[in-house]
Amino acid sequence: MKIYTGRGDEGQTDLRDMSRVSKASPRIEAYGTVDEVNALVGRTRPTGHDDVDEKLREVQNHLHVVQADFANPDPDDGDPEVGEEHVELLEEWMDGYDDELDPLESFILPGGGESGANLHHARTVCRRAERRAVALAAEEDVNDVAVTYLNRLSDALFVLARVVNERDGEHEESPTY
């Protein structure tokens, strides 16, 4: 199978239903930015912490579902879609790490060790993906749970960055004003 087809050379691409849209459309912007998040999460693995790596692998699979969800303007029953269970799983993970972390008393600067900084980077791109998804939802029908998932995922990536930095002995710094 060839990777290139030439079908996108004139600025158009196929959606899941095989309709053609501009590569600059809000739908493509949304799922393309989700792809960026996925690549950044992949760049972070392995963190050196098996439980975190397992969760990040699962997140990467969820993000493929988000992409498929956004790439499908007219979903049918059985098509991939993000569900409440995906959001609830992220919340469960975050709640599980609460005991491991000191409560936040102020904002923190994104950074730390390599894995922690990479997770903070993924978090910021996830926030951008969420903004792109909100813009798409303002123009077209989308699965609202997928937008919620991105919101919750950015929170989860923040928590995972803090966990990894804590385990790696990296000090959290607060901004100075």
Image: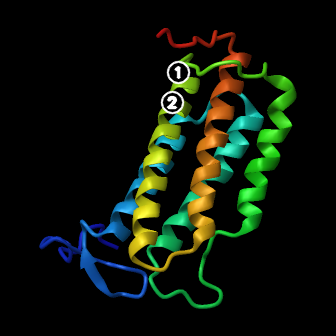
Q: Label 1, on which residue?
A: 114
Three-letter code for the amino acid on which mark 1 is drawn? Glu
In the image, is 18 to the left or to the right of 34? left
Give the position of the N terminus as an image quadrant.
bottom left
Q: Position of residue 16 (x, y in %)?
A: 43, 81
Identify the residue shown where x is 64% and y is 19%: 106
Q: Residues within 10 Å of mark 2 (few under 14, many from 20)?
A: many
Identify the residue shown where x is 72% and y is 43%: 54
Q: Position of residue 93 (x, y in %)?
A: 79, 44
- Residue 154 drawn above or below residue 89: above
- Residue 147 drawn above or below residue 171: below
Q: Position of residue 90 (x, y in %)?
A: 73, 50
Q: Which residue sits furthest bottom? A: 76
Q: Which of these two is toward me, 1 or 27?
A: 27
Q: Are marks 2 and 1 in contact (CB under 8 Å)?
A: yes
Three-letter code for the amino acid on which mark 2 is drawn? Asn
Q: Of helix, strand and loop, which one carries label 2?
A: helix
Q: Position of residue 158 (x, y in %)?
A: 62, 34
- Residue 17 drawn above or below residue 145: below
Identify the residue shown where x is 59% and y is 70%: 144
Q: Label 2, on which residue?
A: 118
Q: Which of these two is toward me, 4 or 107?
A: 107
Count of marks, rendered view: 2
Q: What numbered label is drawn on residue 132? A: none
Q: Which of these two is toward me, 140 or 65?
A: 140
Q: Of helix, strand and loop, which one carries label 1?
A: helix
Q: Which residue sits furthest left? A: 10
In the image, is 80 to the left or to the right of 8? right
Identify the residue shown where x is 12% and y is 73%: 10
Disc 2 and disc 1: Cα gap in Å?
6 Å
